Amino acid sequence: MHRPLMLQRVNVGHKSLADYATIATRGLMDEIRRLAEPLAGKRVVHLSATAFGGGVAEINYTLIPLMNDAGLDVEWRVIHGREEFFDVTKTIHNALQGADAVLTAKQRRVYEEFTELNAAGFVDDYDFVIVHDPQPVGMIAHFPGSRARWTWRCHIDLSTPNRGILAFVLPWICRYDAAVFHMHQYVPAADDLPAAFVWPPAIDPLAPKNMALSAEDAAYIVDQFGIDIRRPLLTQVSRFDPWKDPLGVIDAYRRVKDEFPEVQLALVGSMAHDDPEGWDYYNRTLSYAGGDPDVFILSNLNNVGAIEVNAFQVHSAAVLQKSVREGFGLTVAEALWKARPVVAGRVGGIVTQIDDGATGWLVDSADEAAAACREILRDPAAARERALRGKEHVRRNFLTPRLLRDWLALFNRQLGNETAGVDLDLARQPVVPP
């Protein structure tokens, strides 16, 4: 192991709450102001595994500057790791979502050694510490006398976890002052689990990925990647990961192409340094596409950034998120916010975003996904009506100001302050099964 280094601080820039006043309701903005007042100057740090790729990073780039604008003193720091560490944490991640896996003694030792290294590079001088996902969860064990309130924020689906891997991380989770989950069914059964709160994540409607983009501008951008903008396009935006089922998306596309031979498919992902498995699955997806000239497999390595993702979603006849396991699936909210017809797996947090038949399509197979896409292509006007209802659902439930309000309410609760009438969803304390 190397000498411990200070955890890298991520520069998140500046944002103003006032810019969201025309999007969020007046009542919500008033709640934020009331909740922020007693927290002025409180120091907060977010700890995560990476500063790019995936939902955690996307959320933090908006949430943290808005926390700062609300009067708190907030930082974001990223843990150190090498491939051997991220191989272990990816195994943990997959197993917590139900994969069959066992951690060897060596893997456990690698995880604990890197945890110790990262703890040595962390200065515990905060009022609140927010730890995201399993990668840094064990750091709390190295700060038994911390004055901070520590909260573990789980962004993955723990509804059917691998019990052995869950047992590995639970002793650390149980040390926290609180834990936050996307859904009630993700809260693990444990006698000494801390207070467990449930709220969904959110998207930033003003970020480059979600800001208003004209159809003409979107078409111009998509055209640069070789897409024929005169022909219909299906798009999935996600990591190259078996849980996102890009191979199933290709299967669905092939079935759609039987009726609509002009259809094209874009699989748009991002490669993150904490996901070594992503490279293998990217290559597997490329091979599965079989050189089809109408299948475009793109990533940040092809200069696909936030604006490009926005353009692909805006230009698409349908956006897919055919996950077979999903913590939440922010790409669903992103596409709905753009009023695009969305076809998504009936799993995890996706079901809270899509009311099947009313705001989108929920599917359980490639055949069902293909049938939904064919329905959209046959009657785009009816699909658009469904998508507009989806946009309104996102506006009410899944935008960043609501997420900020939830965090401010939790901080106040942890300090014993009044929460200005905001009732957080406290999960029923689970009972360990016999």
Image (spheres, rainbow, N blue to C red):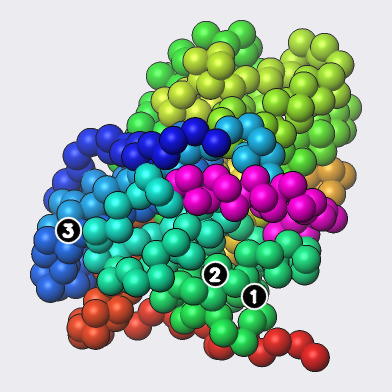
Residue at the spot 84% in from the left edge and 43% down from the top edge:
366
**Vertical side of 37 occupied by 7: above or below:** above
Disc assigned to residue 49? none
- Residue 205's quadrant in the figure? top left
At which x and y percent is residue 277?
72, 34
Residue at the spot 40% in from the left edge and 70% down from the top edge:
144
- Residue 184's quadrant in the figure? bottom right
In this orientation, does residue 364 appear?
no
Q: Name the residue under label 2.
A: 173
Q: Earlier in the sequence, mark 2 or mark 3?
A: 3
Q: Earlier in the sequence, mark 2 or mark 1?
A: 2
Q: Distance between the residues labelled 2 and 1?
A: 10 Å
At which x and y percent is residue 349?
60, 61
Q: What stretch is highlighted in magenta?
A: 90-118
For label 3, count other residues whose C-alpha is less than 10 Å away and answer few (under 14), some (14-19) or many (20+): many
At which x and y percent is residue 399?
37, 55
Prevailing secondary structure class for the magenta stretch in the rendered image: helix
Q: Which amino acid does label 3 sit on?
A: Leu
**Vertical side of 319 occupied by 305: above or below:** above
Residue at the spot 17% in from the left edge and 63% down from the top edge:
42
Q: Mark 3 points at which residue?
A: 72
Which of the image's four quarters has the N terminus?
top right
**Vertical side of 208 occupied by 287: above or below:** above
**Camera-nearest label, 2 or 3:** 2
**Camera-nearest label, 2 or 1:** 2
Disc assigned to residue 188? 1
Give the camera-side residue of 413 and 15.
Answer: 413
Residue at the spot 59% in from the left edge and 52% down from the top edge:
112
* Secondary structure category for the residue under label 1: loop
For label 2, count other residues whose C-alpha is less than 10 Å away and answer few (under 14), some (14-19) or many (20+): many
